[in-house]
Image (tube, rainbow, N blue to C red):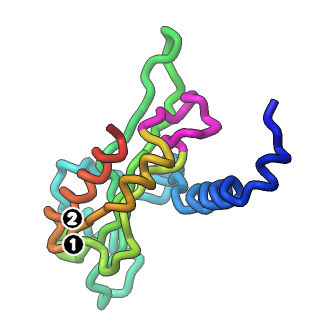
Amino acid sequence: MSNLSQFDSDPIHQLRYYRHCLADGERMDIHSDAIRNKGCLVPADRILTKLLVQKLFADLPEDEPSRDILYCPLCLQQSMKDGGKASSTTVYPFWIPAILARTGELRPPRDDIGIPWLVRGVLAPNEYLNREYPVLSSVERVDRVGTTLQIDRANWKVYLASALDYFRGCSR
């Protein structure tokens, strides 16, 4: 049994708890149902066709040259659990903010605020206990890697390589 009186009187523990709460809010998951219903799934190795780009811009005025998107280079689905077929929950653990131009070109976000993130469900400690989300890293490791994070935004290829380096650094 833990001694909560020690936690309540220790400002370091209080600040650490507060920081974890804030981090949890910033690292939210985008549920697979929302992606299927409102998003657009395009395999990362597939060329964005003109028809697909037109679909993605259908709700924007003609003079909008680009739109913000989220790029997810990885999805995970558990196929077996305890020797039997598992639920069909798909987890999208890593999101990279990007811009899609009407030409179909992907670009880095315009500002430094849009940075890649691992969703909170794949970071330990978590409440999922590997039922749906595999643990790929920890909050502490993501914070440690993030303190030295260098995301180069020169162009999409360089930006994507930087984002994937960040993912590898967090998930070792």
Q: Which of 65 and 160 is in front in this view?
A: 160
Residue 129 occupies quadrant: top right
**Horizontally, is 166 left or right of 8 in the view?**
left
Q: Residue at x 43, y 58 (%)?
A: 39
- Please name the residue that numbered disc 1 is placed on: 153
Amino acid type shown at disc 1: Arg
Q: What element carries label 2?
A: helix
**Horizontally, is 141 left or right of 162 in the view?**
right
Please provide percent x and percent y for residue 165. Answer: 24, 51
Please provide percent x and percent y for residue 1. Answer: 81, 30
Amino acid type shown at disc 2: Tyr
| Residue 93 is covered by the magenta coloring | no
Q: Residues within 10 Å of mark 2 (few under 14, many from 20)?
A: many
Q: Nearer the viewer, residue 32 or 60?
A: 32
Which numbered circle lies on residue 134? none
- Please name the residue that numbered disc 2 is placed on: 159
Range shown magenta: 121-136
Q: How crowded is mark 1: few (under 14 residues within 10 Å), some or many (20 or more)?
A: some
Answer whether labels 2 and 1 touch (C-beta < 8 Å). Answer: yes
Q: Residue furthest right?
A: 5
Q: State whether residue 99 is above or below residue 20.
A: below
